[in-house]
Every structure is written in structure tokens, then in C-alpha cells.
Image: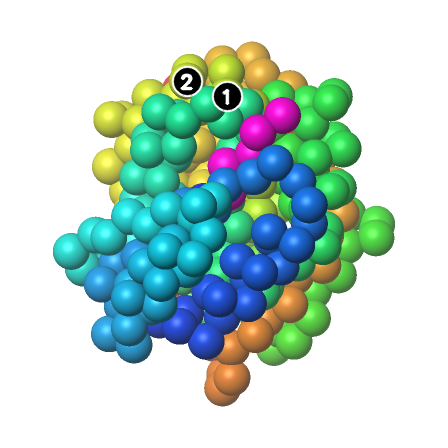
Amino acid sequence: MTIAIVVPTYNERDNIGRLVEALLGLGRDLRVIIVDDNSPDGTGPAADELAAQHSEVHVIHRAGKGGRGAAVLAGFREALSTNADLFVEMDADFSHDPAELYRLLDAAAEYDMVIGSRDLPGSRIVNWPWRRTVFHFLANIYARLVLGIPVRDYTNGYRLYHRRVLEALDFDAIQATGYIVLSEVLVQVHRAGFRIGEVPTTFVNRRRGVSNVTPAEITEAFTGVLKLRRRYR
Ligand SMILES: Nc1nc2c(ncn2[C@@H]2O[C@H](COP(=O)(O)OP(=O)(O)OP(=O)(O)O)[C@@H](O)[C@H]2O)c(=O)[nH]1
Ligand SMILES: [Mg+2]
């Protein structure tokens, strides 16, 4: 099974090299597709250097910061034109541990889509301020109530999809560009009747400083979910 791993980057110059090494070191048949949005810190050129060193690495350059969700979708579109069977998305900042990839891969034998979850027995969230944890918890309860998909973690970007799942996705219907894209993809996959599984993972917040929840994030989390219900009912 060939695995395509899509990694969206915005200002990840200090992380991307280490992440690529960690992924290639797993000894699986995988390629890494980095989607960089013209990061001011020079992640793009750093990614190009990695691609020059490793034939498994490919880089997509986009003109400017266009959101994590849209970046990952662009990566998937490109990855679908390769011979990959399995498709993974993960963050570049080591919030998602490459060493836990095997958990998603193991569960792929049973499920069409696998979510690395922060909310199962055995999951862990490290370094989140309590307010973010509470927000995450409430936002997920709300999403489950409104959208009715029996999944614990709607918004962790550590996920695996079988090719048939991405081939069934209606990419053009997805207008959003940020984190809500994760929920929209989930809604589409659920509606198409695919089997969705979750495995426990550890999420490590790597950012320095306060990762506070902004009012805009709260609004998007709640109105975004309502919009999804209207559009996909
Ligand atoms: N290409 C691209 N990548 C992005 C964009 N925004 C975020 N990312 C990447 O998406 C992943 C998740 O973004 P983060 O900024 O770590 O978001 P977060 O984990 O919710 O927040 P932090 O607490 O700041 O870590 C990282 O790999 C980012 O580099 C974007 O607009 N374009
Ligand atoms: Mg992060």
C-alpha cells in the first residue's frame, strides 16, 4: 500500500525538515506532499530543498495564506493523480506524532476513513490551556448534536482516507478554507455511507505563547456547523 501524506505548512521552516525525516524513517512506502502558502519564514524554499534530496517529497506552492483546509484539499487533488492507495493529512508542527501513524494505518484495514482522536480512552492532549480544552469539548458536543455523526473528534487534522473515499468527495462543493473543512469532509464521507473509525492519539500543542480561543473562532465553530447542516440536510 502506497501512502500519500499531505502536510499543510505556514511558517514551519524549523519543523518541516524534522517531520519529513521522521516520516521517511518509518520505513513505509510513502510520499510526502507539502502544501506551502508562501510562508514568510521561507518554509517554501526549505521544502524545495527537501524535495531535491528525497524523491518521495513533493511541494505545492500556493500564492498566499489560503487556509489549512483549502491547502489540504489542494494536496489531495494532486495526490490522487499518483498511485497512492491511502491518503493522510497531518500538521507540520509535531502536534500529530509521526510515530502514531501506525495506529491509523492499522485501523485502515477495518475502516474507509480513520480519525486520530483526542477524545478517546488512551487519547491525550498536551499543553493546551484549559480554556481551549473546554472550547474543544463543547464544540464537539455541539457538532455531534447538530450533525449527528457518531464521531468524537470532528476537528483533529490527523486523518487517513482510502482512495475510494477521496474519489467520492465533492471537492468543488467545499467553499470554506479553514478548520471547518474538516467537518465538511466528515459530513460528505458520512453521507456517502463510508465506515468511519477513530483511534486514540496524543495531540501536543507545540506553539509558544497563549493559544487563546478568539471570538472569531467561536463564531466560526458554531455558525459553520449550522451552515453545514443546512447545506447537507
Ligand atoms: N498551507 C497552509 N497551511 C496552514 C495554514 N494555516 C495553518 N496551516 C498549517 O496547518 C497546520 C495546523 O496549523 P496550526 O497553526 O498549527 O494550528 P493549530 O494547531 O490549531 O494552532 P496552534 O496552537 O497555533 O498550533 C500546521 O501545519 C500549519 O502550518 C494556511 O493558511 N495554509
Ligand atoms: Mg498546531
Residue at 42 percent of width and 16 percent of height: 168
How far across and down, in percent of the image, does residue 189 sit?
50, 23
- Tell me the quarter of the image containing the C terminus: top left
**Residue sitting farthest toward the top:** 193
In this figure, which residue is indicated by the disc labeled 1? 163
Is residue 5 visible in the rendered image? The answer is yes
Mark 1 crowdedness (10 Å alpha carbons): few <14, some 14-19, many ≥20? some
Mark 2 crowdedness (10 Å alpha carbons): few <14, some 14-19, many ≥20? few
Q: What span is colored magenta in the figure?
A: 1-5
Give the spatial CA distance, label 2 vs label 1.
6 Å
Judge by depth and name the residue closer to the eye, 4 or 123.
4
How far across and down, in percent of the image, does residue 213 sit?
46, 71
Q: Which disc number belongs to residue 167?
A: 2
Residue at 50 percent of width and 37 percent of height: 4
Quarter-of-image position of residue 65: bottom left
Quarter-of-image position of residue 13: bottom left
Residue at 56 percent of width and 13 percent of height: 193
Left or right of residue 203: residue 185: left
- Tell me the quarter of the image containing the N terminus: top right
The reply to whether the C-beta atoms of the residues labelled 2 and 1 are less than 8 Å apart is yes
Coloring scheme used: rainbow
| Cβ of mark 2 under 8 A from ligand 1 | no
Please tell me whether residue 3 belongs to the stretch shown in magenta.
Answer: yes
